[in-house]
Amino acid sequence: MQKAKGILIPIGGNEDKGIEADEMYTLEFIEEGILAHVVKEAGGIDSNIVVIPTASSIPVEVGESYLTAFSTLGCKNVEILDIRSKKDSETKHSIELINNANCVMFSGGNQSKITDKIGDTTIHKILADRYKNEEGFVIAGTSAGAMAMANEMIAGGSASESFIKGAVLMYKGLSLIPELIIDTHFIRRGRFGRVAEAVAQHPKLIGLGLAEDTGLIIKNNCFEVIGSGMVIVFDGRKIKHNNHAILEEGTPMSLTNLKTHILSNGDRFNIKKKKVEVLPIEAPFI
């Protein structure tokens, strides 16, 4: 695994934008929220932030919500890049925005739209190159935007089927971090089974299930958990029994010796060494 110089921030969805009516998403929490971490990693409120709402079915509305959220944090240079086709990914305007950005943020929605409209285009190549070679360059993504960071991308599938072969649909992602498989909305939508099946298909990769309002700061081959929820790590390297390859679709599966970790705010995981570093029990919540 070659160490990238940039930073990835995948988010499990429903990140606190400080604008929701629900009590848990009020403005008083936004300073400590995930988007505040995104701004900090990107270099602060004067950084150039580009939001790409391609995954969304309502990109204009989603773009406006991010403008409001980043503005609330004091950001002055936020642009919406509304890409709806591969042609849009090749325009001079799009290329200039991506070249000049300190942070690119992908919204939620349908992750396949991201790879269909941005994958293998000029701006995809710029994003991958800048992430690999530029210190401090941030690519963030929530929900679909987080899932698209992987190479083996979860494109969909049933969460109601507990662990049935074929319950997860895989697709090619942006391959920014091919060592991981990322799923989001993990707790509320009960997606344990589909991440487990994805790891059964690709046991050399690390599966991650991100809860809502929870994210990761990935840099230097390690990640740190941020936000209010949990991250489940699926490590399939030492699986002893994996019958995925021989079963017909729709058949219940079995795995043994699938290693899992439950991590929360401040906990760290070394992706290269596959080792966990948790906060001491007496440490304060950050």
Image (cartoon, rainbow, N blue to C red):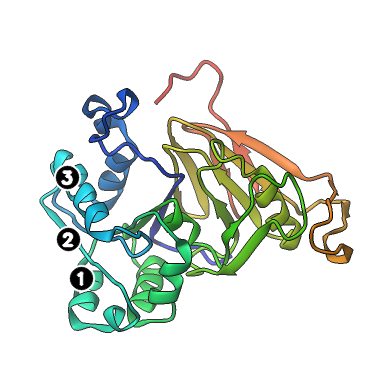
Secondary structure, mark 1, is helix
- The disc, 2 or 1, on the residue closer to the chain's N-terminal end is 2
Question: What residue is drawn where x is 71% and y is 50%?
Answer: 196
The image quadrant that residue 249 belongs to is bottom right
The image quadrant that residue 20 belongs to is top left
Q: Which residue is mark 3?
A: 68
Q: Is residue 20 above or below residue 243?
A: above
Rounded to the nearest angstrom, the CA distance separating label 1 from label 3 is 19 Å
Image coordinates for residue 34, horizontal then vertical, percent: 34, 39
Q: Which residue is mark 2?
A: 79
Question: What residue is drawn where x is 50% and y is 63%?
Answer: 3
Look at the numbered discs 2 and 1 and tell me whether their residues touch, using CB distance below 8 Å: yes
Q: Is residue 2 above or below residue 184?
A: below
Image coordinates for residue 148, horizontal then vertical, percent: 48, 62
**Along the horizontal axis of the image, is 255 left or right of 9?**
right
Q: Amino acid at mark 3?
A: Thr
Front residue of this view, candidates 216 and 118: 118
- The disc, 2 or 3, on the residue closer to the chain's N-terminal end is 3
Q: Is residue 24 above or below residue 13?
A: above
Image coordinates for residue 58, horizontal then vertical, percent: 29, 58
**Along the horizontal axis of the image, is 60 left or right of 212?**
left
Question: What residue is drawn where x is 38% and y is 75%?
Answer: 118
Q: Which numbered disc covers residue 97?
A: 1
Secondary structure, mark 3, is helix
- The disc, 1 or 3, on the residue closer to the chain's N-terminal end is 3
- Would you call the spot at circle 2 few (<14 residues within 10 Å), some (14-19), or many (20 or more)? some
Q: Amino acid at mark 2?
A: Glu
- The quadrant in which the C terminus is found is top left
Image coordinates for residue 157, horizontal then vertical, percent: 62, 56
Look at the numbered discs 1 and 3 and tell me whether their residues touch, using CB distance below 8 Å: no
Rounded to the nearest angstrom, the CA distance separating label 2 from label 1 is 8 Å
- Between disc 2 and disc 1, the foreground one is 2
